[in-house]
Image: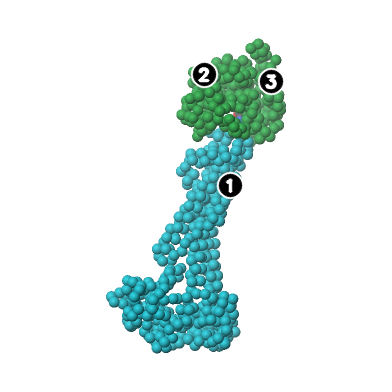
Chain colours: A green, B cyan
């Protein structure tokens, strides 16, 4: 059995809005294994993004334990979380989130800068862009790229630090289905070639069908844990 | 992220919003330009005035009638006899020379078809020693001229140029002062302009002649000013004491109610320093206010920039930026903004000082504004510090944004 990259135990998240408390997560537990491609589905407001924020170390859970890549991170300070994000997590957003003033290359370089890497940054960023098929767009700015190309830049950026896990919150949500499928193909090929662990939040059953395991979330807890899928993954 | 990268990114960011950056730094530009120009002009003026005061002569005391400090009803004018008494080596051993002087600031002088208005001085032979005046041609006014009330005149070069169109070969010419004929006995060496106006726009005649024929005074022996030269710089205070004692005795003044004033060149210099100090403080205050306003402008625009870039900040945090990185990014931006304003301000201030210098030269009050290295350093450091200081609050706000909230921000 592959070792787990993500171990979440009894995660809760409560948002306080004045008097009202919103329980976005209510004791959610899950494990995700190295090299796995997992999709997270669930109705709107079920807590998918909240979960992704916690798994991506962008936010603290209200309670519960979270171990990422063998490291307990639930109680780390903000700056320590920043470092974990930088080294272990790659983010892909629905709205790409590229810096508009910067070239594709500079955008991809950004995580390396925050990692304090001083030499060979450009080359690594270039390799990463080549891996997503953008070797001809190194010096384009986001406004000079199509939506699909922008998302490829974002993927190159997520890859560049060789993270343990890539988290994508509705990565195809802003793209038409054809381009969305291209992005999905790219992500799957990266998983095949590099063994990158992928967690993809999606509303699209066609996208979910291409992943090895679907985690369904309802009202802040996992709906069911399909053990059978784990067996099929081991076989793969 | 290294400081150098932060610097490059800040430049890029400011550059992407040139107009806004430009307008933001105006306050700093104006404040710094004011400081630089003010210091340069003040220093130039000080040098020039100091030079002018020293140029009057050496180790001088100026004695005139009246006393601003005391409220006096019965003021006796200074007279020739007062001057003679001061000149007595037994009464005033520390006095080297005495030159009484009467003056009219505005007389009509004519020669041939030309006519001009100038200032007229009635002098004694010692005047030339005391004031360091030399003639370029001809002779000085001497004792014979004085005793004979001779109708002779010495011309300043400016008057000579105006009347004759030249400054040489004028000895023996005739001029008319207030309609009365005078023979030119010489032309004085050029003195050059000073902060007090041209010293070459003047005609000197014997004091006796002036008193009887041109400048009529209520008291016949009255003089406007007595110039006293001390034996040496060290003797100036003692000479002043002696002069005061003589005048008190002669004017029978009550204790503490002198009806005359004695100022040394040192006193004048101090007065100039005081006036320039007030001027500097005043303009310095204006500059400080402008810098403050400029700083607040920077803070304002940085706050706008932080909220505009909330998503960007969220993204940077998601990619691994720590609080410190964001803080440095925005502080670099604000201090760079301010520093650029400061540098432009230095150039502008320099330009202003230069133009003021040119205008002064054109109007005959030559002085050279001096932009010192200290002023440049001061302005550079001050503007950077202002940017840092007023950037702290916005930068802190940016650094403390929650990444999740920031990423969701529209
Ligand atoms: N910052 C917040 N403050 C208060 N409540 C919040 C906040 N963020 C999320 N919530 C609430 O938590 C619940 C879960 O939100 P979440 O964004 O995780 O849903 P989701 O599954 O991602 O939905 P969607 O599919 O629409 O993106 C919702 O009820 C939402 O209103
Ligand atoms: Mg969501």
Q: Looking at the picture, how far across and down is residue B120, in whole percent?
A: 40, 78
- Is the residue marked by circle 3 packed among few (<14), some (14-19), or many (20+) residues within 10 Å? some
Which SS class for mark 1?
Answer: helix
The reply to whether residue B246 is visible in this rendering is no
What element does badge 3 sit on?
strand
Which residue is rendered at x = 62% and y = 27% of the image?
A89
* Label placed on residue B388: 1
The disc numbered 1 marks a residue on which chain?
B
Determine the residue positioned at 59% across, 25% down.
A159
Task: Tell me the quadrant of the picture where the N terminus of chain B can be found.
Answer: top right
Q: Position of residue A192 (x, y in %)?
A: 60, 16
> In the picture, residue A166 is in which quadrant?
top right
Q: Residue at x 52, y 79 (%)?
A: B229
Residue bearing mark 3:
A4
- Drawn side of residue B110 relative to residue B349, left or right: left
Q: Secondary structure at mark 2?
A: helix
Q: Nearer the viewer, residue A5 or A230?
A: A5
Q: Are marks 2 and 1 on the same chain?
A: no
Residue B26 visible (yes or no): yes
Q: Is residue B37 above or below residue A174?
A: below
Residue carrying label 2: A182
Subunit under mark 2: A
- Say if mark 2 contacts mark 3, CB within 8 Å: no
Q: Nearer the viewer, residue B55 or B3?
A: B55
**Residues under labels 1 and 3: Cα distance?**
47 Å
Tell me how far mark 2 sits from mark 1, CA to CA. Answer: 47 Å
């Amino acid at each position: 059995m592959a070792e787990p990259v993500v171990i979440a135990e009894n995660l809760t998240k409560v948002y306080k809005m004045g008097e009202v408390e919103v329980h976005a997560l209510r004791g959610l537990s899950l494990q995700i294994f190295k090299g796995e491609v997992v999709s997270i589905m669930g109705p709107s407001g079920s807590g998918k993004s909240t979960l992704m924020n916690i798994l991506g170390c962008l936010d603290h859970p209200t309670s519960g334990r979270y171990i990422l890549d063998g490291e307990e991170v639930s109680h780390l300070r903000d700056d320590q979380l920043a470092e974990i994000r930088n080294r272990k997590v790659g983010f892909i957003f629905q709205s790409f989130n590229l810096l508009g003033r910067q070239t594709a290359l500079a955008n991809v370089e950004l995580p390396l800068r925050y990692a304090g890497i001083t030499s060979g940054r450009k080359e690594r960023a270039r390799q990463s862009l080549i891996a997503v098929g953008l070797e001809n767009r190194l010096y384009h700015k986001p406004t000079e790229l199509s939506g699909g190309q922008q998302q490829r830049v974002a993927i190159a950026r997520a890859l560049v630090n060789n993270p343990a896990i890539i988290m994508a919150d509705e990565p195809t949500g802003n793209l038409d289905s054809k381009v969305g499928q291209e992005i999905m193909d790219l992500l799957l090929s990266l998983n095949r070639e590099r063994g990158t662990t992928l967690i993809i939040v999606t509303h699209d059953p066609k996208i979910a069908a291409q992943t090895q395991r679907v985690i369904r979330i309802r009202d802040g807890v996992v709906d069911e844990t399909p053990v059978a899928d784990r067996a099929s993954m081991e076989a793969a | 992220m290294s400081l150098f990268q932060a610097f490059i990114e800040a430049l890029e960011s400011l550059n992407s919003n040139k107009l806004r950056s430009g307008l933001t730094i105006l306050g700093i530009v104006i404040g710094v330009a004011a400081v630089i120009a003010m210091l340069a002009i003040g220093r130039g003026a000080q040098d020039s005035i100091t030079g002018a005061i020293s140029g009057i002569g050496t180790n001088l005391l100026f004695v005139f009638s009246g006393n601003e400090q005391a409220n006096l009803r019965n003021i006796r004018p200074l007279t020739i006899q007062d001057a003679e008494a001061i000149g007595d080596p037994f009464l005033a051993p520390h006095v080297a020379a005495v030159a009484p002087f009467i003056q009219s600031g505005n007389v009509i002088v004519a020669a041939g078809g030309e006519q001009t208005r100038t200032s007229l001085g009635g002098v004694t032979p010692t005047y030339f020693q005391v004031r360091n005046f030399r003639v370029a041609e001809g002779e000085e006014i001497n004792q014979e001229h004085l005793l004979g009330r001779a109708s002779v005149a010495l011309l300043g070069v400016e008057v000579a140029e105006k009347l004759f169109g030249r400054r040489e070969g004028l000895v023996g010419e005739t001029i008319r002062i207030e309609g009365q004929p005078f023979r030119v006995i010489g032309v004085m060496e050029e003195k050059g302009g000073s902060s007090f106006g041209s010293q070459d726009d003047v005609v000197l005649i014997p004091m006796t002649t002036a008193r009887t024929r041109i400048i009529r005074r209520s008291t016949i022996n009255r003089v406007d000013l007595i110039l006293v030269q001390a034996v040496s710089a060290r003797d100036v205070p003692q000479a002043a004491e002696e002069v005061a004692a003589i005048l008190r005795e002669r004017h029978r003044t009550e204790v503490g109610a002198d009806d005359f004033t004695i100022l040394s060149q040192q006193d004048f210099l101090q007065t100039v320093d005081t006036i320039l100090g007030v001027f500097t403080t005043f303009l310095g205050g204006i500059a400080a206010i402008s810098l403050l306003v400029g700083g607040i402008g920077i803070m304002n625009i940085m706050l706008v920039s932080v909220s505009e870039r909330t998503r960007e900040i969220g993204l940077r945090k998601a990619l691994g930026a720590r609080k410190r990185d964001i803080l440095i990014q925005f502080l670099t931006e604000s201090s760079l903004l301010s520093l650029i304003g400061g540098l432009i301000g230095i150039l502008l201030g320099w330009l202003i000082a230069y133009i003021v210098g040119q205008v002064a030269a054109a109007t005959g009050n030559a002085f050279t504004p001096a932009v010192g290295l200290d002023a440049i350093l001061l302005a550079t450091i001050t503007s950077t510090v202002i940017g840092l200081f007023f950037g702290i609050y916005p930068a802190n706000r940016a650094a403390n944004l929650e990444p999740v909230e920031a990423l969701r921000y529209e």
